[in-house]
Amino acid sequence: MNDTAVFKSGVTLAVIAAICTAMVAMTYRLTEERIIANEQAWLERSLQPALSGLFFDSGVTESKIVVPPPHELPGSEAAIIYRVYAEGAPVAALFVVTARDGYAGPIRMLAGIDVTGLVTGVHVLEHRETPGLGDRVESTKSDWVKQFDGHSLLDPEPAGWSIKSDGGQFDQLTGASVTPRAIIKAIKETLLYFDAHRDEIFAEAVTEPDKEEESP
Amino acid sequence: MTPRGIIDRFKTGLWHENPGLVQLLGLCPLLAVTSTFVNGFGLGIATLAVLVASNGLVSATRRWIRTEIRIPIYVLIIASLVTCIELIFKAWFPSLDRSLGIFIPLIVTNCAIVARAEVFASRNPVGSSIVDGLVMGSGFALLLMAIGVFRELLGQGSLFSRLDMLFGGDPMRGLVFTDGGWLLAILPPGAFFSLALAIAAKNTIDRRRRKNRHSTMPRRARKLSQ
């Protein structure tokens, strides 16, 4: 290739790069609003399972606290707590935590605890458990996670917070005991944390939602 | 192009030169996402859209592209198109996007797309290239859907579950025949088995057809063709 050919190729590449960039930029502009709305809606919707049957009048996603590691909650990354209030009085706290010891890596989950310490709902957000076995912890696939609703640290006693084959009170999943064990342990640790820090959690001022919110 | 020619092209793309069954291109997404019909359908449609658009663009710009720089330009065009498709999925099919995850951006690496740009679009007019993208893309998409249906039926005992990812609304379980199924089918080995069965089935049908054609031919013609 001589110099003119190199120059021409360079110009062609630059023009096509500019056209492609323009195309992506336009699509981005057209979809940006919907994407942000979708992410917000997804976040609110994914918090719903932990809010069923509660009365509250505050926005959920605005009352977020990020607990940086190290903390006593399950998981080694930052945990997120959303709080809901009714007429200014605390109603419940939703924890986005990570159960570390899943069968195939960490399990990101949501645990809701009301102000008296009862579990209001548990929901698995992200996992890589085996399809057909461990993935039945997803609420779309089975009702397994519903069995924790209404339980607390007193009911059952701490020793009962494990699967039946380990001498506890909760059902396991056929063919998968590692996943339920990890989730139950994470719920128990979250309950213990809530018990020790309840006043701090609800006392902390509501923070302004910043733009770079990380979704759970 | 005559309607007859287009029909022939579809036969080629869907059967004789199916990108997945015959050319064995794009196997990574083919094997990874086909655990259900919806996933196969979503990725199939996304790949089809990218293939049609990239064939069109490559063909439209083929006069100005020097052969030395054609590959970087194909990559540029395909990568931009995939980014657009990803944004569109995020905006209109958010749950499908979540379910397919990394495999939408990975369409960039689907060699079926670069292959069509290089083999066909860079040498043919725009209309014909778009038709080529359409037939090859549908061949790939139909294979993804077929394997999705097969694996979902065997592995979960259901059909068309989670169609809500396409149309929105509450999670739908689809047609449920049994509760649970043959687990292996939805695990990665099941993908390999399903593809192998599909290829074997295609080859069997082809061979049988060839035999039939032979036996219906007059004896002299059969002798000549041997």
Image: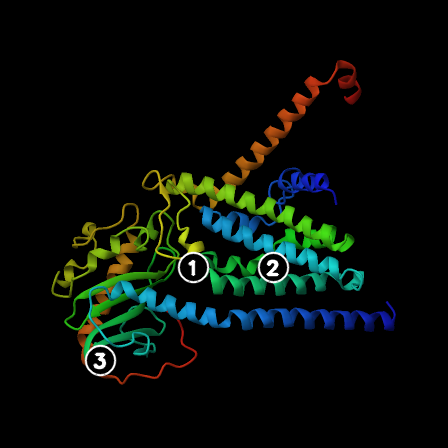
**Residue shown at 32% from the left, 83% from the top:** A207
How crowded pointer 1 is (Cα within 10 Å; few <14, some 14-19, many 20+) is rated as many
> How is the protein colored in the picture?
rainbow
Q: Quadrant of residue A44?
A: bottom left
Q: Which residue is mark 3?
A: A202
- Callouts 3 and 2 close, C-beta under 8 Å: no
**Residue shown at 68% from the left, 49% from the top:** B131
Q: Which residue is mark 1?
A: B95
Which secondary structure, mark 2? helix
Counting labels gives 3
The answer to whether marks 3 and 2 sit on the same chain is: no
Left or right relative to B90: residue A72: left
Residue B18 at x, y = what percent?
Answer: 63, 42
Of the residues shown, which amino acid type is indicated by label 3? Phe
Of the residues shown, which amino acid type is indicated by label 1? Ser
Extreme residue toward the front, this view: B3
- Callouts 2 and 1 close, C-beta under 8 Å: no
- Residue B191 got which mark? none
One can see residue A99 in this view: no
**Residue shown at 36% from the left, 50% from the top:** B172
Which residue is nearer to you in this view: A162 or B75? B75
How far apart are the alpha carbons under marks 2 and 1?
A: 21 Å
How crowded pointer 2 is (Cα within 10 Å; few <14, some 14-19, many 20+) is rated as many
One can see residue A40 in this view: yes
Residue A212 at x, y = what percent?
Answer: 43, 78
Residue A79 at x, y = what percent?
Answer: 32, 73
Left or right relative to A169: residue B131: right
Label 2 marks which chain's residue?
B
- Residue B108 got which mark? 2
Which residue is nearer to you in this view: A161 or A127? A127
Q: Quadrant of the C terminus of chain B?
A: top right
